[in-house]
Image: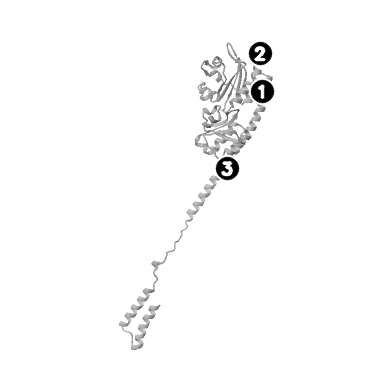
Amino acid sequence: MGAICGAFALVAAHALLRQSEPPLSVLLPAGGVLLLGLALSLPIVGDEPIAEVTVVNEDEELKGRFRALREAYSVLEQRSKEDADMVAFVRADTPQAAAQAIRNATQASGAALFVPVDDRWELYGSAGTVSGELLESFTSRALQAHGASLLFAAGRAVGAVWTPEESRDGLAGLSEVLAARFADRLEVDTERKRRKAAEVRATLVEGGGSPDEVAQALALAIGADSVEFGVVGSSGTTSIGVFGPPCGLPGAMRHETGLGLPGWVAAGAPIVWIGDARNDRRLDGAAALRARASTIGLVPLASGRAYVWAAWHSVGAGRTSALSTMRAAEPVVTRWLTQAVGR
């Protein structure tokens, strides 16, 4: 605005003083003043700060929210699965079902549960692939050396759980729940087994029923699929009481002194316990598979004059309790032998 006024003043002064139109010599300087003033009045944009403009990408924002929701759902789904597996463990009505629940919870290829029996640990139940070495009884130190985790409740060990090494991280968050539930289940199982064993021992001691009925009572007490009582004579062995499908494996068992029950008698009729019949060198694995036998126990009775064997289709029989109950048949078998001699 000042440049316009200055140029106008030059032209007006000439017109008033000379009383004539301004010549080119006046107009040119006035135009120069005007141009110079206009140039100086323009703002210098190079020194002005440029405001930052944030561009919001709605697609990226939606994708981020979706990822967050998906992760939250995945966490909830995993927790729901773990809760379902724990419910399955609590509701499991067999040792094998309880082991399967642990296997599912840890996504392991196999799982095994152990319970304390006297001063040792015995297999309570298993599912999936379990090493044959774990089918025997252990001390606490030996069990832990195999990678099992002891479960404690009220300051005492109430159980132990084993899974393969690659899936043991899944047990970390389950130990407390497992210990509490295992303590409850162990107490119930112990009481039930105590009552059943008392009933069976009463039946065995009293000798009521036929040999087949006693064999059935024994099978129910120890959870066996097959049981057989037999006597040992000079010409071989004779079956006197049977329950369940025929097994045939005791007759095919290899001993250093011979094959089958005659070889067992020649070896001094020792107590035999085979926890993994399909992989034991004393048995033909194919024969064990055909017989659907996984565990076998053979106990001498009446000073070696008789025997009782039992077979289980599934792994998980408790060695100590089963052998103890099988030995409880001693009085009734002795009575049978005495009656047979009297006749």
**Amino acid identity at mark 2:** Thr
Q: On screen, 166 above or below 212?
A: below
Neighbours of disc 3 within 10 Å: few (<14), some (14-19), many (20+): few
Of callouts 2 and 3, the N-terminal one = 3
Rounded to the nearest angstrom, the CA distance separating label 2 from label 3 is: 62 Å
Q: Which numbered marker is on residue 69?
A: none
Rounded to the nearest angstrom, the CA distance separating label 1 from label 3 is: 45 Å
**Amino acid identity at mark 1:** Arg
Q: Are marks 2 and 3 in contact (CB under 8 Å)?
A: no
Rendered location of residue 101, percent (x, y): 57, 36
Figure quadrant of the N terminus: bottom left
Rendered location of residue 80, percent (x, y): 57, 42
Secondary structure, mark 3, is: helix
Of callouts 1 and 2, the N-terminal one = 1
Mark 1 — residue? 201
Neighbours of disc 2 within 10 Å: few (<14), some (14-19), many (20+): few
Q: Is residue 212 left or right of residue 68?
A: right
Mark 3 — residue? 80
Rounded to the nearest angstrom, the CA distance separating label 1 from label 2 is: 20 Å
Mark 2 — residue? 338
Q: Quadrant of residue 155?
A: top right
Neighbours of disc 1 within 10 Å: few (<14), some (14-19), many (20+): many
Q: Is residue 99 left or right of residue 202?
A: left
**Nearest to the observer: residue 91 or residue 327:** 327
Image point (33%, 81%), residue name: 27
